[in-house]
Amino acid sequence: MALVASEVDFELQIVERQSQYRDLQLLTDTELIDIAWTGNSDKRDEVLHRVPFPLFLGGLGVRGSIIRKDFADDYASISSMNDLKKYVFCQGLNWPDANILKGAGLSVYGATKFDSILKMVELKRCDLFPLSILEGEGELTAVKELYPDLMFSTSVLLHYQLNMFYYVKKSNTELADKVLSGLEILRDNGALYEYMKNHPLTRSAFPLNQFRHSTFLNMDGSHNQMVEQMKGKSF
């Protein structure tokens, strides 16, 4: 959509994802990948060129949790960061969020595969698996038959500064500029909002004011405009 909007001639080939670490390694060191999307980190900004446009418009850092259904009441009773410290978090081993959670003094159990994380929650090796409100419901729905005892809860929402960006090689600023131009066009003409509202992965998060009764826990003191909309304004 971004390349079409910026009127670029291109041929798009999708490469099956392996792990964030491996994908970014291939992007950095080989010609197999030209562009990849991932959460931001200082290290990634150092070795790659970041397209400075948050793909989920701030929503990536607003997180409900995949939990066991029998844990729902305990989860809903959480009201402070101290309450969170009673529990064990599952998270992707190489995801930037893992360091954010650890930095907040929380216990984190890491795994490299998404399915492995779900299995650990199911087996009670950890209590909760935070995912963005824009992806959690969709991700779990896609595998719900395999994990019938799990649910995505938004009764408690964590939020911290984390965004998803496209990254390209340091040398490929031409591609970065074209993608950025297209994304800005999609934002300004409303097409990106409509896409998020209708995409199977993100549509369950809209309208955002459905979360106005959730408990919000700010983990890093950052301001998030999307959170303000969720607390009482429609999107």
Image (cartoon, rainbow, N blue to C red):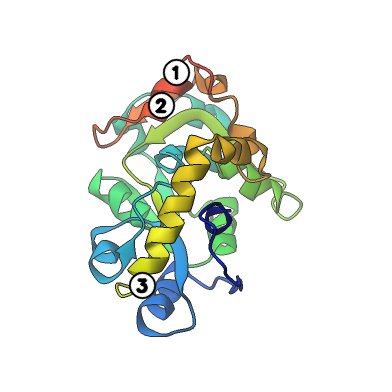
**Residue most extreme to the bottom:** 30
Q: Where 161 sits versus 212, above or below? A: below
How packed is label 1: few (under 14 Cα within 10 Å), some, or many (20 or more)?
A: some
Mark-to-mark CA distance, 1 and 2: 6 Å
Q: What amino acid is found at the position of numbered circle 3 in the picture?
A: Asn
Mark-to-mark CA distance, 3 and 2: 34 Å
- Residue at x-position 36% and y-position 51%: 97
* Residue 203: quadrant of the picture: top right
In contact (CB < 8 Å): disc 1 and disc 3: no
Badge 2 marks a residue whose secondary structure is helix
- Mark 1 = which residue? 231
Horizontal and vertical percent position of residue 64: 49, 37
Horizontal and vertical percent position of residue 218: 31, 31
How packed is label 2: few (under 14 Cα within 10 Å), some, or many (20 or more)?
A: many
Asked whether residue 131 is in view, the answer is no
In the drawing, what numbered circle is on residue 227?
2
Q: Which is more toward the observer, 20 or 176?
A: 176
- Residue at x-position 53% and y-position 51%: 124
Q: Where 59 sits versus 79, above or below? A: below
Q: Which is more toward the observer, 201 or 96?
A: 201
Badge 1 marks a residue whose secondary structure is loop
* Residue 40: quadrant of the picture: bottom left
Q: Nearer the viewer, mark 3 or mark 2?
A: 3
- Residue at x-position 43% and y-position 80%: 26
In contact (CB < 8 Å): disc 1 and disc 2: yes
Q: Which is more toward the observer, 80 or 93?
A: 93
Q: What amino acid is found at the position of numbered circle 1 in the picture?
A: Lys
- Mark 3 = which residue? 172
Horizontal and vertical percent position of residue 200: 68, 44
In contact (CB < 8 Å): disc 3 and disc 2: no
